[in-house]
Amino acid sequence: MATVGMGSKVDWGKYAPTRPMLWRAIGVWAAISLITTLTMYGLVLSGKSDVVIGGDFTAFHAAATASANGDAAKIYDPAFFQEILQRDYLGAEHGTLSWQYPPTYLLLMLPFAALPYFLGFTLWSTGTAAGFFLGARSITRDRLILFAIIAGPAAYSAFITGQNGFLTATFLLIAAAFPKSRPILAGIAAGLLTIKPHLGLLIPIAYLAAGCWRAMTVATLTAIALAVLSFLVFGAEPWAAFVGAVFDTGERLEAQILPLAKMTTPLSAMMFAGAPAIIAYGVYAASLLFSAAFVWRVWRSISDEYLRVAVLIAAVLMAAPYGFHYELIMLTIPGAILIIIGLENGWLTQERTLLAVAYGIPAFYSAVADFRQGISIGVFATLIIFGLTVRRALHEAPDLVSFRRDGAPSSLR
């Protein structure tokens, strides 16, 4: 029997989980998540609990209902919005919920005003989850990877909150994956992402770097068309109110009124840690500039679409001023790409371990999000995935550190 002594090395590779082991582990997590969700549904439907399923979907449903009643501008008033929530959605925690989305988002939510809350939430969460799953199949058909994505902690968080994490992740995926092969589709997705404009800051940089002119044009026209349509439907007042809400969001961040513990960006992490505003914004500026520069370099210098998709999506939360835990679902795409490349080309040191850590981080929110410890858990997932993606891109395309252009084409696998 071999012993481990001074100077000897442990072969950790033999402890790596096999595919059957991974199937079982993810299956157990998926079963726990499903049982938890069904139990919550059952308690509510049986009248034994007054908790509102879907949490943040209450904000979407309330905004849709108010807009249908002609109050689209009023929902940007926090007092008015809280009054609606407290009146119509008893049992939900509404303390930090406010409305900061542009009026274009109301166009997507308006049909839900005609539906009862519970039915609306069910259709919203299952529909956006299905859309994201179909988008993920354009990256890989590996059943284990797809199962890991849709049954993982990030997907559960995106589903149970009733938020729009699946939707924005789908728009990002389509916008990043198809600007050359399907520019109209990619451009429409990029234009639709203006419903959450802070998540699309890097898309124009990527498109300009790669010369994706058709996709860029379609994205611009889509965004303009959405804005004009929302103006025609709701009028000018909601747009004026939205501008005020944007400035209010910055103030709420600095005052820690918003739940910084549940956020996932460098800026929110610095603020939650209690850093002075000048330092927090300095860190954010550095993060934004580096991520933008790296996206530009990758999209300008290499043709590997897999790496382009991974780098762009992994950089989104590095460039965004704020983002919540339910948006970590987008990071499963660069995570999946790193796994695919690692299986094909070999793993980098500690790559698998760090991917496993990032994969599991969303599972800890329910346990730690209410504690004011000054440590943002979600930002670690953002940093890990972005760091691993940068490292892999530099490993696969060493010319990124030079000024030569790699013209070898490749396509999504």
Image (cartoon, rainbow, N blue to C red):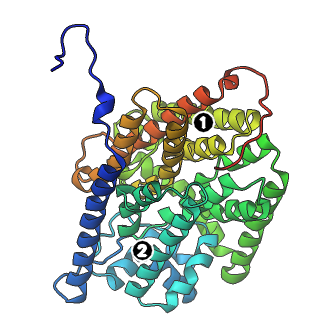
403 on left or right of 107: right
Query: Which residue is more in the foreground, 101 or 44?
Result: 44
* Amino acid tagged 2: Phe
Q: Height in image: 396 above or below 366?
A: above
Q: Earlier in the sequence, mark 1 or mark 2?
A: 2
* Amino acid tagged 1: Ser
Query: Which residue is more in the foreground, 193 or 387?
Result: 387
Q: Secondary structure at mark 1?
A: helix
Residue 268 lies in quadrant: top left
The residue located at (30%, 24%) in the rendering is: 11
For label 1, the crowd category at 10 Å Cα-Cα, with few meaning under 14, some 14 to 19 and many 20 or more, is many
Residue 219 lies in quadrant: bottom right
Query: Which residue is more in the foreground, 92 or 83?
Result: 92
- Give the residue pinned by disc 1: 291
* Residue 194 makes an appearance in the image: yes
Residue 197 point in image, percent of width and height: 62, 57
Q: Secondary structure at mark 2?
A: helix
Residue 357 point in image, percent of width and height: 34, 41
